[in-house]
Image (cartoon, rainbow, N blue to C red):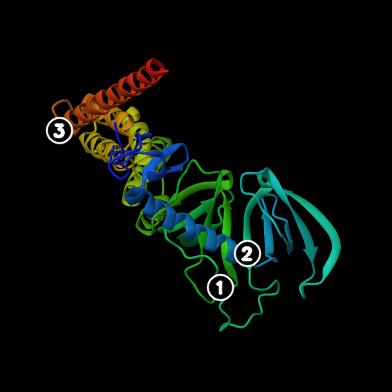
Amino acid sequence: MKCPNHLTRDVAGYCSVCGSFYCQDCFTRHEGNLYCKKHYKPIGEKLELERKLTEGRRRRSRHAQVVHFRNGQTAQGACRTMNLRDTGFHLECENDDGTATGESLRVRFEDVKYICHVKSYDGKFEPSENVQEYTPGGTDVVVEFEDGEVLKGKTMNLYNPDHPRFYLIPKDETSNNINVLVESSAVSGVYTLEQYKEKSRLDAQPSQGDGDGAGKRERVQLEQEESMGDFYFEQRNYQPATEQYSLARQNHPDSARIRRKLVVSTVNAGIGFIKSRDYPDALKYMEQALEIDPGNPHAEKKAKQLRKVIEKTQRRMKAYLEGSLNTETKKRDRR
């Protein structure tokens, strides 16, 4: 099989997005996959943007931070490098005026409650100075910590409960905090503004006797599981939404409302895999939706389409491998 762009060259593979066959010069390899020029273009643009953002952040060699520990203590200083995937980082301690104390503190993330990247240690700064280096692209949330403290802001990206820590950007531009790195293990709950208002209302209701108190705790537990699913669903983060709705359904299997939400989030999670061309996982979610709601027309339609796409891809791969084998056989015969 010859490349449609270079008629004298044999194909070397196919695009992981559109499935078109091309020679080696027509492809760009990224994370183990081959992409044609058309479908690699948005990936290349995204990588270039990330590179520019990274360079811009590296130019800020000094990061003034105030670390809030779970035991109530704080420490302040400059951190020149911080790897969020590491177990911790080194903090070069400083006084309020920014002068180094000469002390270096090893900070472990497991001891941290949250870390504030601040404009100044003493809270005195020039309001007109633009020091915001992160653009919030997530959702307005209320973060409640295990010790009862509450922070409000906007997540830098879509909130993912599986991540060990996440950035919160204050809505108040006059705040001394540029951003807050929240340690997820120190958090008791993350809510939308509406969900937190409802939770506060339920918590304010007086309990009457042990029986009523137990009933209230059960209602709050249901509210927590289902509301977390609603929270992720509103952010279009459908996989964790599906997990939360599944937990809620385990405790309340007869709830038609939770069942409907679970089906919709499962189908949407599958559609997300379709958009990323991960058809096997997409089919898995559609089949899960059909297990919950047999005969669901949307899930049935998508599952049928996915099976055809997977079968077609398998046939094309088989034909390609057979063609490559025949080409090698002919070359050997000519020798």
Seen in the image, is 257 located left or right of residue 76? Answer: left
Is residue 1 visible in the rendered structure shown here? yes
Of labels 2 and 3, the one closer to you: 3
Determine the secondary structure under disc 3: helix
Residue 117 is tagged as 2
Q: Are marks 2 and 1 in contact (CB under 8 Å)?
A: no
Identify which amino acid the numbered label 3 is placed on: Lys
Which residue corresponds to the image point at 69% horizontal and 54% vertical from the top-left? 72
Q: Is residue 324 above or below residue 97?
A: above
- Where does the N terminus fall, quadrant-wise? top left
Give the farthest residue toward the right.
102
**Compared to 133, does 155 lie above or below?**
above
Query: SS for tag 2?
Result: strand
- Front-lying residue, 307 or 118: 307
Q: Position of residue 279 (x, y in %)?
A: 30, 32
Q: Amino acid at mark 2?
A: His
Residue wearing tag 1: 175
Under circle 1, the secondary element is loop
Residue behind mark 3: 301
Label 2 to label 1: alpha-carbon separation? 11 Å
